[in-house]
Structure formats: structure tokens, C-alpha cells
């Protein structure tokens, strides 16, 4: 029996997966009828996948975040492993491609001129200091293959298939600095499923911006991960905001089942 799962930001946020019901619950959630079993009292508007109007968006599926050799793995790796983030993003890519769902990737790149910025936020300063997402230039792919800015190798078959829309890079955390909204509008997309890195930075910022732009958004928290450092848990912060802002949150299993179900209707 298929179950719908959701998330809770308690108990260190391992993955916070809670089964709600069986097959009927999955159908109800997609129709917008399920209230989260998280004792919050918050409504769950739900999220209906509509063919031709719904897309999968993956933020920063890049080595610097998701490879053990990436420069950010030391702070995000533990959470990524607990969530099964790498595998779950792969499962979403595969389901979307199988269902002929449009897929968008919003990457993070820094070029030499970006290192001339006169001020930065805390995480921007860190990323620039450790060379995260660095490329030789906007028109150069020199030393790009296998670099921290490159895609995680297992995702290349999905991203480099000639159909995935790879937007211009975002420069801070949200899509305000790239062409994601334009690309989605031009394809008639108004409903977005969000996954990718990192949860409380780029994934959350994309969620917020798309909601402000009038898109309906669902987030898949266990297909994200975030930095966890003493005193600060980025994933816990993100899940709280996903729950309060998005129309719906669901685990990867439920999201994949919904994508497949919508493709057969």
C-alpha cells in the first residue's frame, strides 16, 4: 500500500517521515484534502500535479554540495546522508523524466569578476573564501568537468539530455538573479516541485521567490539537506519555513508516486 509521508522539524530532523494513511490519503493530498499530522494546527492546501503545468526544479545539484569531495560536504554531508538526499534527488529526476515532466535546474556559479564584490553576507563570504562553485568565466568551460561547480556525475544523464532547462546561474540564493521565472513562464509552468541544495539557502529562497511570483509550490524536504553547525541547524530552519510557506511538503516516496500517478491519468 502506498502511503503519504510528511515532515516534522522535531527530534533533530533525521528525516521526520510520518505516514498518514494509505492509497486514499495519497489521492486526498494531491487533491488538497489532507491535514498534516504534525500537531501544528496549520492547514495543508495540498498540491495537484497537472500535466503540462507542473515542473520539477532542482537547485544546485553540484559536486561542491553533494559529493564527499565537495568543499561544503564537511557541513552538509551528515544531513545529506541522513536524508538520503543524493539518492532522493536522483529518484525525482528519474520519475520526472519518465513522466515527461519538464525539469529545470538552477545552478550556482561564481566567475572571477564575482570575487570583486565589495560586501557579502555570511555564507556568501564563506563560499567565496573556499572557492565554492568557481568557474573560469561565463564563456569558458576550462577545468569545469569534474570541478566543484560541475553536476554530480550520476545526474548528468538527466541534466545533459537536451531537454532539461538549465537556467543562467543565480548569484546569491534566489532566482532573482537568473532567468528561471522567465523560462518557466515561457513554458506555461505555474506549479513547481522543489528539491536540491541547500535547504535553508537556495531551495528555500527559490520557494519564497516563486511563491511571490504567483507559482504554486511543493517542496520535497528529504531531497534537500543543509549545513548543521554548533548552535545552528539549517535543515530544521528550512523545514519549518517549507511547512509554513509552501502549499504542500511531502517525502520523496510520495512525490515520486504522485508524479507517476499523474502521468497515467
Image: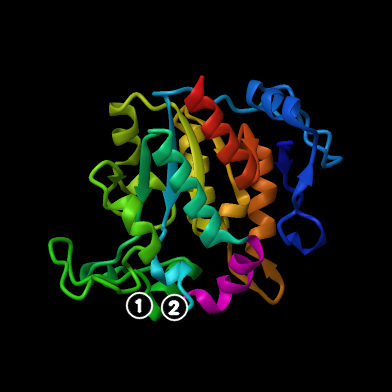
Label 2 CA crowd tier, 10 Å (few <14, some 14–19, many 20+): some
Circles 1 and 2, Cβ within 8 Å, touching? The answer is: yes
Between residues 45 and 122, which one lies in front from this camera angle?
45
Q: Residue furthest left?
A: 139
Q: Secondary structure at mark 1?
A: loop
Where is residue 169? Give x, y as percent.
Answer: 30, 54
Residue shown at the point (35%, 73%) measured from the top left: 148
The residue singled out by tag 2 in the image is: 71
Horizontal and vertical percent position of residue 45:
67, 26
The image quarter containing residue 24 is top right
Q: In the image, residue 52 lies at what x, y percent?
A: 39, 23
Q: Which residues are magenta?
A: 72-83
On the picture, is 221 further left or further right than 62? right
From the viewer's perspective, is the residue at label 1 or at label 2 nearer?
2
Q: Is 252 drawn above or below residue 24 in the view shown?
A: below
Residue drawn 39% across and 40% down? Answer: 97
| Residue at image coords 57%, 75% | 75
Magenta-span inclusion, residue 147: no
91 vs 22, left or right, is: left
User: Viewer-proximal residue, 14 or 27?
Assistant: 27
The image quadrant where one finds the N terminus is top right
In the rendered view, does 93 fall on the left or right side of 246?
A: left
Spot the residue most to the right: 39
Q: Is residue 228 left or right of residue 140?
A: right
* Residue at the spot of label 1: 131
Compare residues 2 and 61 and report the one nearer the observer: 2
Amino acid at each position: 500500500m502506498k502511503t503519504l509521508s510528511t515532515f516534522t522539524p522535531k527530534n533533530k530532523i533525521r528525516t521526520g517521515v510520518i505516514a498518514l494513511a494509505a492509497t486514499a490519503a495519497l489521492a486526498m493530498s494531491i487533491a488538497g484534502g489532507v491535514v498534516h499530522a504534525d500537531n501544528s494546527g496549520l492547514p495543508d492546501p495540498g498540491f495537484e500535479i497537472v500535466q503540462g503545468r507542473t515542473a520539477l526544479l532542482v537547485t544546485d545539484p553540484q559536486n561542491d554540495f553533494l559529493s564527499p569531495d565537495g568543499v561544503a560536504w564537511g557541513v552538509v554531508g551528515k544531513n545529506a546522508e541522513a536524508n538520503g538526499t543524493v539518492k532522493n534527488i536522483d529518484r525525482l529526476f528519474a520519475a520526472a523524466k519518465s513522466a515527461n515532466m519538464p525539469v529545470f535546474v538552477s545552478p550556482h556559479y561564481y566567475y572571477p569578476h564575482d570575487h570583486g564584490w565589495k560586501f557579502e553576507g555570511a555564507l556568501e563570504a564563506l563560499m567565496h573564501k573556499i572557492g565554492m562553485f568557481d568557474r573560469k568565466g561565463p564563456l569558458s568551460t576550462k577545468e569545469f568537468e569534474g570541478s566543484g561547480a560541475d553536476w554530480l556525475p550520476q545526474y548528468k544523464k538527466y541534466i545533459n539530455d537536451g531537454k532539461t532547462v538549465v537556467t543562467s546561474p543565480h548569484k546569491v540564493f534566489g532566482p532573482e538573479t537568473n532567468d528561471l521565472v522567465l523560462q518557466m513562464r515561457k513554458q506555461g509552468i505555474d506549479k513547481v516541485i522543489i528539491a536540491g541544495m541547500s535547504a535553508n539557502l537556495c531551495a528555500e529562497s527559490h520557494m519564497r521567490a516563486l511563491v511571490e511570483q504567483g507559482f504554486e509550490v511543493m517542496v520535497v524536504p528529504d531531497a534537500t539537506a543543509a549545513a548543521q553547525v554548533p548552535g545552528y541547524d539549517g535543515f530544521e530552519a528550512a523545514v519549518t519555513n517549507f511547512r509554513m510557506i509552501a502549499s504542500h511538503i511531502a517525502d520523496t516516496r510520495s512525490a515520486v508516486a504522485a508524479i507517476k500517478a499523474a502521468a497515467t491519468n
